[in-house]
Image: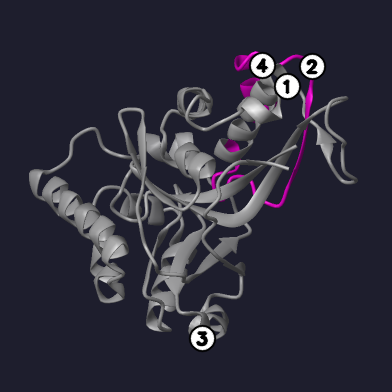
Amino acid sequence: MIRVPATSANLGPGFDALGMAVTLYADVGVVGFDDMPEGAHVANDTHPAQIAFLRAGGQGQVWTQTNIPMGRGLGFSGAVRIGGVVAAEVQQRGVDTWSRETSQALHIGTELEGHADNVAASLYGSIVATADGRVVKIPTSLDPVFIAWVPSFTTSTNESRTKLGPVIAFDDAVFNIGRTALLVAAFAANDIAALSAATQDRLHQDVRFSVAERSRAALESGIGAGAWCGWLSGSGPTVALLCDVSDADAICAALPPDGDAKQLRIDHEGARII
């Protein structure tokens, strides 16, 4: 059985380049090969885990069990796709020979997702930067609570991306490049004070907030209640907030009541064989 963490992507300015693995999980196994736990479901032929499994050369059908909400910006499709690819590779080569370094999971997952930030974080865990088929973990000693405010409504990543303009103003590009560099440096230097400015964005969040005003309100409430920083998770509508463990309960209480506030942590292991 393969266990894969959920993710939060973009991290504010790091559009399609930064991702963070968090402690919600999808389990993927092969029917007849892995024991199928109670509550698991056999994936149909259109399920992203099954498509990835077959794309990686798997034989048969996969089952899935997950507590990652679908269509909420927490990397459900990326996680199950990584699980499908790894399940196929383990089926073909065995548990003892599987490794991230030789796996095709990043390549196939990126091909199927259309971008690498979610799948890279799901595969490697922690906080990652990815570009040109490469993944680098961002070193940090910070151990925040990751609060995910998950509303009841969903959004489509593909539909959301069509609302983004084809041209980026020069000043906006410079703004996001600077904030992305600052964010990577802030994590590496454990500089909590820099995180608020470093997660600002001019490329995608305002466009996506325009159809998810409750998410904007949740972000503002969380920051106002003492979160270090926050961003629209993936394409939304989930809002991600980082904070000290001692402040987490008060921040959750300040968030709008029409959403589920989950207190999570950063997952540092990534995809694993159970």
Left or right: residue 155 versus residue 184 is: right
* Up-down relation of residue 242 to residue 6 (above or below): below
Amino acid at the residue labelled 1: Gln
* Label 4 or label 2, whichever comes before in sequence order: 4
**In front: mark 2 or mark 1?**
1
Q: Is residue 49 magenta?
A: yes
Q: Which residue is mark 1?
A: 91
**In front: mark 3 or mark 1?**
1
Q: Residue furthest right?
A: 38
Left or right: residue 261 versus residue 131 is: right
User: Dot 1, how many residues are within 10 Å of its Cα: few (below 14), some (14-19), or many (20+)?
Assistant: some
* Label 3 or label 4, whichever comes before in sequence order: 4
Residue at screen point 29% across, 61% down? 188
Q: CA gap, disc 3 to disc 2?
A: 47 Å
Q: CA gap, disc 2 to disc 1?
A: 10 Å
Left or right: residue 195 versus residue 177 is: right
Residue at screen point 52% across, 33% down? 100
* Up-down relation of residue 253 to residue 82 (above or below): below
Residue at screen point 69% across, 28% down? 87
Q: Are marks 3 and 1 in contact (CB under 8 Å)?
A: no
**Element type where label 4 sits in the image:** helix
Q: Quadrant of the C terminus?
A: top right
- In percent of width and height, residue 52 lies at 62, 23
- In percent of width and height, residue 167 lies at 18, 35
- Which quadrant of the structure image shows residue 70? top right
* Up-down relation of residue 146 to residue 202 (above or below): below
**Element type where label 1 sits in the image:** helix
Q: Which residue is mark 3?
A: 246
Q: Which residue is mark 2?
A: 60
- In percent of width and height, residue 121 lies at 47, 44
